[in-house]
Amino acid sequence: MGRLLQVPNPQTGESLKSFLSRISMANHYEYISWMYELCNFKNGKSLYRLTPRENDLNELSNLVGIPCEKLWGMTYVNEFNDRLSRDYYTQLIYKTGLVYKHSKVCPCCINEDKYEHKMWDLKINLACYKHKILLINECSKCHGFISYRRINVEYCNCGFPLMNLPKLHANKALIEISKLLQYSLNKISIKEETYNPFYELSLKNQVSLLTYFSKQLTLYLDYVKFTNNISTTNKNFQQIIIDAFEIFENWPNNFHSFLNKFRSTRIEKRGARLQLSGIYIGLHRKFTQPEFSFLRNEYYQSINKDKNRNHKVVRSKISLIEESNFLNSNEVTRLLKLKPSTVKKLIINGVLEGDYKDFSSHEQLLVPKESINKYHALLKNNLSLTEVAAMLDIGVRKVVELQNEGLINALLGPHMGINQWLFAKDSVDLLLSNLLSTVKIEDDKSGETINFRQATRIASFYKLKIGDFIKLLLKKEIIPYLIQPQNNGLNQIMFNKSDIEKTLKFYNERTGCVFNALEISRILGVCDGYVRFWINAGLIRSNSENQVKKVHINDLLNFQKKYISLQSLSAKLNIHSTKLRRLLLEQKIYPVLGMH
C-alpha cells in the first residue's frame, strides 16, 4: 500500500498510540482499529509490547514516510531495551511498570499540545510537573477509564473533551518524581542539596527500582494493590508511590526506617517472616549492577547490626544457600527460575548433575553449585527459542518446524517443554551461512522482488512448510538472486516472485498437490463454509465426487485469477466492506454470489 495522504508530524515525547490516533483522525478513519490493521498490529494494547525481535514497523514506516528508528523512539525500546531481554529490570518494567489498559492525561497538556506524552504511560508517574497537577485516567462524564484506543486524543470515547477534566493539585513528591523522570528521559541532570543516590540512576534503573519498592509496600503492608485498574486520584495509590520515593530521601536514614516497618509488623500478619528474606533476595540476587551497590551495602549493615532473633534466622538461611556446595529443590528452582518438574527432567536427561530420589511421601533433589554454573554457561553460549527466532527473523513456530526437519540442532528439546528449548548456536549459524551461499547475484533481473518471509507465504499456498522450502533452496531447485544486508536473518535473501511461483507450481504438479475445503479457507482467509459453498456452486472446480471435496492446485489458481471476495477487495482498497458494496452496486457491478 502507498503512503497515506495526511500524516501529522510526530511531536517530541509523543507516544506511538497517540501518533496512530492522530493519523487516524487526519485521514478521517471511522475506527482506530483500521490503522492497527494497516500496520499489522493485533490490538492497541500491544503497542508497548512490540519488540524488534518479533515485530517490525516497516508497514507503518512506509505508510507515513518516517524512519523506523524514529517510530521505535515513540516506544520505550531505546530506554528499557527489548521486552524479550532476560534481565530482571526489563522484565519488571514491562510486566508491572507500564500502563497498558487505559490512558492517563494532563488536561492542560491535552489542551496545549493536542497529543499524549509517552511519559504518562509509566505507572509510577502520576503528575504533570509542568502544570503541577495530577494525571487523570477517569472520564468525568462516563466515569470509566479513558480508553487507549481513542480516534481523537482530545476526547473520551463518550465525547467528553479531556481538556475539561478536573485540574487537581498534585502532591509535591509526585511533581518531583514526574520532573525527575522527564529529566532522566532527556538526559538532563538535577543537582540536589543533599545526597540522594536515586537521582544519579538512569531512567531504566529509576523506574525498575521505584516499581520494585512500590510492589514490596503493597505486598506486605497495608496499602491498596499496585495495579492498573485504579484511579490516579486514589489517595492510597498515590501514597504508595510517595512512600517508595521517600525511601531514598535523607539517605540512608529513610531506608533503615523502611526496613523497620517490616520489623515492627506483627508475626501473625501475612508474610512478616518471609518479607525480609524476600527483600534480601531482591537486593542481593536481582539488583546486581554496580549502580545498586548503595542499596545492598546499607541492607547488609542493617542485618549485621540487628539483634532480633527472627532476622538472624533469615540471614542464616540465606547464608546456607551461599556457603553450601549443594542446593536443594527450593533453592535450585529459585536460582534457575524453573519448576521442580523441569529441574527433575534436566537431571534425568543429564543436563544438570545432581541426585534425585523419589520416596513414597516426598521427593529429594540435590544439585551441586558447580552444575548450576555450568547450566548458566550453557544458556549463555547457546540460543533460546526466541533468540533463534530473532536471529533468523522468523516466528517461533517456524523455528520448531526447522528443528523437527533436522535443519537446526536442539540441545534441549521438546521433552523439556517449548519454553526451555535450547539450540546450538553453531547449527543456526551454519544454516544461515548455507542459505546465503545459495544466492546467485543477478543485477538485471526484472519483475517483483520479494523477501524470504513473503516467499514462504507463497510456498504455504502450495502446501510447503518452511522446512520443505529450505530443502528446495539447499538443493538449488529454487535460486535467490539478491542479498539485502539491511534486512535481518533469512529476510536478507531476496527472490524473484514469478520464478518462485513457476518453480513451486511445477513442483506441486509433479507431486499432485490437492487441497480440502479447510486448507483452502486458510489460504484465502475465509471460513471453510464459504469454500464449500463456492465448490458446490461450481466456482471452484472439484476433482472428487465424494463427500470430502478435493481441489487441485491449478483449479484453485484459476479461481483466484477469476474471483475476489468482498472482504479481500475491501482490505486491498482500504474501504469498509459495507461502503464498498454500496459503491459497486451503484456502478451496477453485481457479485457472482451473495446478493441474497
Image (cartoon, rainbow, N blue to C red):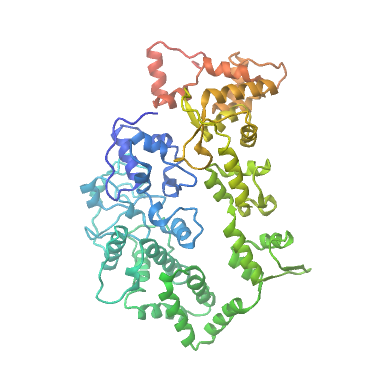
In the figure, 301 relative to 158: above or below? below
Q: Is residue 388 left or right of residue 514?
A: left
Task: Work out which residue is located at the far right of the displayed protein and give it.
Answer: 360
In the figure, 582 relative to 469: above or below? above
Residue name at image x 60 percent, y 19 percent:
556
Residue name at image x 65 percent, y 23 percent:
508
What x and y, as percent, mark residue 367?
68, 70
**Considering depth in this image, is 514 or 453 the residue closer to the camera?**
453
Q: Is residue 27 left or right of residue 288?
A: left
Q: Quadrant of residue 467?
A: top right
Residue name at image x 59 percent, y 50 percent:
385
In the figure, 295 relative to 487: above or below? below
Q: Is residue 308 left or right of residue 233?
A: right
**Considering depth in this image, is 46 or 434 the residue closer to the camera?**
434
State the quadrant of the N terminus: top left
> Does residue 57 appear in the picture of this structure?
yes
In the figure, 64 relative to 80: above or below? above
Task: Work out which residue is located at the far bottom of the displayed protein and give it.
Answer: 307
Q: Is residue 400 left or right of residue 39?
A: right
> Does residue 549 appear in the picture of this structure?
no
What x and y, as percent, mark residue 498?
53, 22
